[in-house]
Image (cartoon, coloured by chain):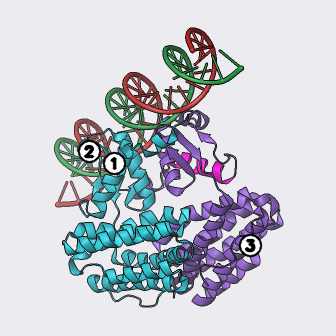
Chain colours: A cyan, B purple, C green, D red
DNA sequence: AGTTCGGACACTGTATACAAGACCTAACAT
DNA sequence: ATGTTAGGTCTTGTATACAGTGTCCGAACT
């Protein structure tokens, strides 16, 4: 019997390296513009250069690192304008995800949403900030999964990581996430109200943008791309 | 002087391999589910396995190949439902791109749009079908560039390639693209009419979806995600 | 004849080795 | 003093080698 399920769950070194490097970038442990030398990373993680190289290619495709041929890879830089631009994309993509989730959600997917929210509330009460950030991303990811659109999820995963990165890079001046908004979004999805779910998601991202703009001190554009 | 411009334009083997493999997948030369053996591809393209491996990781991140650890990479499969799902994403993303393009386009970017349209019309007249398909993708790409949102472009590039792939895989039953729609979209962008531009883009994708559904014979859902 | 076990084969995962280009420094010439 | 050039070093690009795992086929056994 062809046992692909075993292989599908097997994690190779490149998986670990990719996740670890992405985590270090998103968490800010690797600063913007910092050079990523293959030898150093390989030694740091105790692997050879090959898994590191393959990871860097993936992270470049996801937009976390910039690669210049014959020069090397550096952590991408994130200007205030680029950070702001992400919110336009998020409103469009997450709005769609919320709408589709409301249309096609199953009891299992709604359950998953609620469980993430519960875990998040608990993490908030216990003051575990980095766990809160991860659970925030996990919630949005769960919305995407509830939408049941494979390509949407493929593009959402790196986008949400990038959103978390933007948050981390400007978190000093901001408070915690607003979980009541997540709750109402979850309810709209569970109720199957497409319009309401999309509106909630877009409003949530718009609120995050206002928080971002206040933090970076750039009252840029106020007009929304999707409403 | 640190001459990064030279390095930035230098194309390494992995670039060539990635583009070539993607091209063969999108064009249908590599069929769905076809196994991609590293040794064979390396020999076929006259390179070693390393550039091939790195390319495969990128193509996996873009959704063109599926990789199972310790088994290998295969060309992704594209069910009718997955093909249809892509149109939801395109309406959201390309609608946003058109709106932003209308808001922020420059004379240079509008000029680029018009030049692509002219080239496309010429290719249509000369009956060069594969060039028409490429120019169609190039037009949508140019809209994204006119929008001036870096992350939007980062995610649009593979998405448009995927759209072309979906088109190729079902093109037998369909006619050529409708260029009048591109023209009116271009005019709306040039006029700076955000609402109109987004509406045109969404309508264009919706029309493509209808054509797709007619070709695959699956009158699925008719409700649109963004209107 | 069907089934199961074993071994050969094929392919991926990982590491290492070598080649080539880029950057930096320092010596030299003007 | 400044510009330039040569050398060395660092890093990436590419190829090759080896180990480990899965697959496939055939033979032996029931």
- Residue A139 at x, y percent in the picture: 39, 70
How far is the residue under mark 3 from the one under mark 2?
50 Å
Mark before the other along the chain sequence, 1 or 2: 1
- In the rendered structure, find residue A17 and report the number of the disc placed on it: 1
Q: What residue is disc 2 on?
A: A45
- Residue D14 at x, y percent in the picture: 47, 37
Give the dominant element type of the magenta stretch: helix, strand or loop.
helix
Disc count in the image?
3
- In the rendered structure, find residue A197 and report the number of the disc placed on it: none
Q: What residue is disc 3 on?
A: B210
Identify the residue at image location x=55%, y=34%: A1
Identify the residue at image location x=68%, y=67%: B136
Identify the residue at image location x=68%, y=73%: B221
Contact between labelled residues 3 and 1, with CB atoms less than 8 Å apart: no
Question: Residue B211 lies in what quarter of the image?
Answer: bottom right
Quadrant for the C terminus of chain B in the image: bottom right
In the rendered structure, the answer to whether residue A198 lies left or right of residue A214 reads: right
Secondary element at tag 1: helix
Secondary element at tag 2: helix
**Residue B165 in sight:** yes
């Amino acid at each position: 019997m062809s046992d692909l399920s075993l292989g599908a769950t097997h994690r190779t070194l490149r998986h670990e390296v990719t996740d670890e490097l992405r985590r270090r970038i998103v968490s800010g442990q690797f600063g913007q513009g910092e050079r990523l030398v293959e030898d150093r990373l390989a030694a740091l993680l105790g692997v050879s250069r090959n898994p590191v190289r393959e990871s860097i290619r993936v992270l470049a495709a996801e937009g976390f690192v910039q690669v210049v041929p014959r020069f090397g890879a550096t952590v991408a830089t994130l200007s205030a304008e680029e950070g702001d631009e992400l919110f336009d994309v998020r409103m469009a993509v997450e709005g769609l995800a919320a709408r589709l989730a409301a249309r096609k959600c199953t009891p299992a997917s709604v359950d998953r949403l609620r469980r993430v929210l519960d875990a998040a509330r608990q993490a908030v009460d216990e003051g575990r900030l980095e766990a809160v950030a991860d659970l925030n991303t996990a919630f949005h990811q769960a919305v995407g999964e509830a939408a049941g659109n494979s390509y949407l999820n493929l593009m959402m995963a790196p986008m949400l990581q990038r959103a978390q990165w933007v948050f981390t890079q400007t978190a000093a001046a901001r408070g915690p996430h607003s979980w009541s908004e997540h709750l109402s979004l979850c309810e709209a999805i569970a109720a199957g109200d497409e319009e309401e779910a999309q509106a909630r998601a877009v409003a949530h991202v718009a609120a995050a943008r206002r928080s971002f703009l206040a933090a970076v001190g750039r009252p840029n554009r106020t007009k929304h791309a999707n409403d």
